[in-house]
Amino acid sequence: MRMHQYLFLLFLLMKPFYWFSSGGLQIADVFFILSFGLYVLFVKKGEKISIEKNDKWLLYFVVCIVAINLFYGVLHGESNFIQASLYYVYNLLVVLTFRAYAEEQDSFLVNVARICKINLVLQLLFYVTGIGRYFAASRYMGTFNDPNQMAFFVYISLMMAFLIYRIRGEKLNWVYHVIAMALIFFTASAGMLMGMVVFYGFESLPKVRMLAQRQHSVRAILIGTAFLAALVLFSPEIGDYISDLSESSIVERAEEKLSRMGESAAGPTNIEERGIDRLYLYPEKLLYGAGEGYQERFDRSYLSGEVHSTLLSMLFYYGILPTAALLYWIWKNIGRLSVSNMAVVLSLFLESLTLLNQRQSLFWMIFVLLSVLYKKQVADKETAVVPATLLSGTQENAARDILLR
């Protein structure tokens, strides 16, 4: 590995450390800027950076964003439109750089997986030693400024390590899954926990299907489940466990969200609380975009801040055509992945419905890894077909020789 790649790894290692307020540059971003600068000056040596065909759709999306935000910025005389554009330009550079580094050396992705695992272990150590911070005394947020930030980082770190191990034809140790689930539970992020449930549900579908075809496996599962249920139910401490669980932050937040689903009279619904109501209050913005800034102009919306939903916010701020370009880029990266690998995508989209993730570089990097995995699966199929073709050709030649004798 070379210096620019090591600097990128430092960028990932420092990502969980929020030294300043959210929304601005952090120490980690300095390492990425240095990495990108070294890559352009000493690796590319001033040459034009080549953009993969698929990534051109992401480029089109970002160009549309800059144009729309520039228009609204001039119209309203607000500079925060330009700031919003810079997030997308920055993450476009991260995507192009990460893809280039991943294709340079296989060892780079191996080290990325190591950094992801180190970050998970570090956050657990911070929790155990009491170094991390809390939000409202009950939601743990570690070295982050917000519990949802931490939950997303933990989730995406696990997914990145999981995908890299899949790319290498290996399995990620179950210990890291347990660490990630525990950390997300500590943050009391209901949306992220739901995303994890979806991930494990879809990831286990092929295994469940295989077990269902074996009668003895089904019997063993039923007997084992009944045995564990009996142990739990007849445990003398079951009452204390249930009481502690019912009073935990994650359960309280889940109950709160469920109670708000239909409460328009008593209080705001989840849709209103996250600003998603703007999609039906200002439907014309879905056609040409509202621009990302000057949120106070949407006075009919319950929330005065920004829309807290990744894809829905981009649809509202930038309209149908740019969002279609983004979705096409995502589709080209995903390809026709297996059900278990699609579990990553489905869980990511689910948790992104209620969280604003597009400013996080790791959100975009996950699609690069999915693209690498898809290409590997296609290459593996092609290499599997070639020997079979050669074998059939050899058999045909042997049969022809026998007939000619």
Image (cartoon, rainbow, N blue to C red):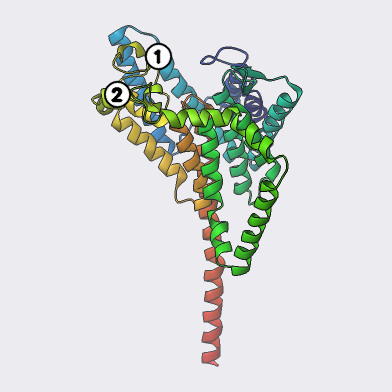
Residue 331 horizontal/vertical position (percent): 41, 43
Relative vertical location of residue 367 with respect to residue 24 in this rendering, above or below:
below
In the foreground, 290 or 249: 249
> Which of the 4 quarters of the picture holds residue 354?
top left
Residue 223 horizontal/vertical position (percent): 65, 60
- Neighbor class of circle 1 (other Cα within 10 Å; few <14, some 14-19, many 20+) is many
Distance CA(mark 1)–CA(mark 2): 15 Å
> Which of the 4 quarters of the picture holds residue 197?
top right
At label 2, the amino acid type is Gly
Residue at 53% in and 54% down: 205
Of all residues, the one furthest to the bottom in this rendering is: 405
Residue corresponding to mark 2: 289
Relative vertical location of residue 339 with respect to residue 11 in this rendering, above or below:
below
Horizontally, residue 153 falls left or right of residue 305, namely: right
Query: Which quadrant: the C terminus?
Result: bottom right
Residue corresponding to mark 1: 82
